[in-house]
């Protein structure tokens, strides 16, 4: 989660000319105030973060602070609250129709829960941004999480809220943190079907990951008919990522971003908030994946064969000692076979997809075998 991954992403976007695209604005963000944070997070937890931020020695492990995953550091509160402020500003602008799309690749902190930090996440900007949209009049919001890890914190924030549909497509908890997110985890009694989880087998590559995503997400989002689509684009699904066990390419991640963009236009009239998330191969993967996301959201998608600017390559190598890929592609086609081709009972992937479809589809009036 080192800030270098955000710096390299912003530099790459800038040097690719994405920040100069007509109609695209780069805006600053102020830290969210405590009242805004407390629309999702408990007051005592926010106080604990503030205290640990002022003096890391006071960090309390019972709030998930000062741990290996969430070490305390000076300025932690302001840094985490600024991410929230950016996502909320974009969410409000998208909902109000001031902009069609918003991207905060600093955001997507989906593990933070109302009362504790978790999985490198201090405050859950996605949850606070969606709460702000509900408070501003949104009636239904769909959230799609493409991180390799289960989006447990965002799901928990809306577990029993029928106005929000959370869909998480992730590596199974049997092989990866946080160990949750199975097909039978469907939401609270007042929002059954409001949580949808697709737990994928380890080792899955482009074709399987894209097949799974397209077998579940568009059908549910379309049926839910949301006012806004919020997506989380953790790129730790990549085969070079040191934490996950999927083998997805930048090309498949780009295709998934394209699909979410198309889905926003089809299901919400284009109202789309896209966030970052995990991603720990900070030179080869994160900057290219999120630069593609910015390009897609600005309606100026990059050809995958676009060269990575020489100035950026030199800067990244000087900063990290690691040579970065010279093109905006991993050289893969990112082709997949759609679910309509039929179900293979011998496939662990297809069994996982069918488990999710059978658990969730009927709760949305969909036929798990045909829709």
Image (cartoon, rainbow, N blue to C red):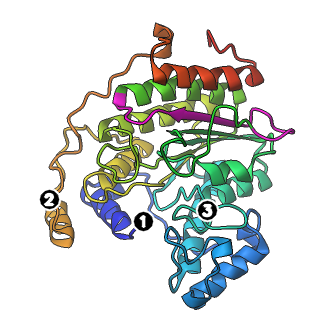
Numbered range of the magenta stretch: 187-206
Q: Is residue 194 above or below residue 216?
A: below
Circle 1 residues within 10 Å: few <14, some 14–19, many ≥20? some
Q: Which is more foreground, mark 2 or mark 3?
A: 2
Which secondary structure dominates the residues rendered in magenta? Answer: loop
Q: From mark 3 to mark 1, how far is it between C-alphas?
A: 22 Å
For marks 2 and 3 on the same chain, the one whose residue lies earlier in the sequence: 3
- State the image coordinates of residue 69 (x, y, percent, origin top left): 50, 67
Left or right of residue 143, residue 24 in this image: left
Residue 281 within the magenta-colored segment of the rendering: no
Instruction: State the image quarter where residue 65 is shown.
Output: bottom right
**Label 2: element kind:** loop
Q: Is residue 178 above or below residue 256?
A: below
Image mark for residue 117 = none
Pointer 2: what residue? 323
**Residue pictured at 74% horizontal, 40% vertical:** 140
Residue 216 rendering spot, x and y as whole percentages: 57, 26
Q: Mark 3 falls on what kind of element?
A: helix
Alpha carbon separation for disc pair 2 and 1: 20 Å
The spot of residue 269 in percent (x, y) is 61, 34
Q: Earlier in the sequence, mark 2 or mark 1?
A: 1
Q: Which residue is mark 3?
A: 89
The residue singled out by tag 1 in the image is: 1
């Amino acid at each position: 989660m080192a800030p270098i991954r955000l710096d390299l992403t912003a530099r790459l976007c800038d040097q690719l000319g994405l920040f100069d695209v007509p109609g695209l604005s780069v805006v600053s963000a102020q830290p969210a105030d405590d009242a805004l944070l407390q629309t999702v997070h408990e007051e005592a937890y926010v106080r604990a973060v503030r205290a640990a931020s002022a003096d890391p020695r006071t960090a309390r492990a019972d709030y998930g602070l000062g741990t290996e995953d969430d070490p305390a550091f000076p300025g932690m509160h302001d840094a985490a609250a600024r991410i929230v402020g950016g996502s909320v500003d974009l969410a409000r602008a998208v909902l109000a129709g001031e902009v069609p799309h918003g991207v905060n690749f600093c955001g997507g902190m989906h593990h933070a829960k109302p009362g504790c930090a978790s999985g490198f996440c201090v405050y859950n900007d996605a949850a606070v941004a969606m709460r702000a949209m509900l408070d501003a009049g949104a009636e239904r919001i769909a959230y799609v999480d493409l991180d390799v890890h289960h989006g447990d914190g965002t799901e928990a924030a809306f577990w029993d809220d029928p106005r929000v549909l959370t869909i998480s497509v992730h590596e199974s908890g049997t092989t990866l943190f946080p160990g949750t997110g199975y097909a039978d985890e469907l939401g609270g009694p007042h929002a059954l079907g409001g949580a949808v989880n697709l737990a994928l087998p380890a080792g899955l590559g482009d074709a399987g990951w894209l097949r799974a995503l397209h077998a579940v997400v568009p059908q549910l989002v379309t049926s839910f008919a949301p006012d806004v689509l919020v997506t989380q684009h953790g790129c730790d699904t990549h085969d070079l990522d040191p934490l996950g066990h999927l083998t997805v390419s930048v090309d498949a991640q780009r295709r998934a971003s394209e699909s979410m963009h198309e889905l926003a236009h089809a299901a919400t009239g284009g109202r789309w908030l896209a966030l970052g998330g995990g991603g720990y191969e900070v030179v080869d993967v994160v900057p290219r994946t999120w630069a593609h996301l910015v390009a897609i959201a600005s309606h100026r998608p990059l050809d995958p064969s676009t060269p990575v600017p020489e100035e950026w390559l030199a800067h990244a190598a000087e900063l990290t000692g690691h040579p970065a890929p010279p093109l905006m592609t991993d050289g893969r086609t990112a082709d997949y076979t759609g679910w309509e081709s039929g179900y293979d009972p011998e496939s662990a992937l297809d069994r996982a997809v069918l488990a999710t479809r059978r658990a969730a589809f009927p709760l949305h009036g969909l036929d798990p075998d045909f829709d």
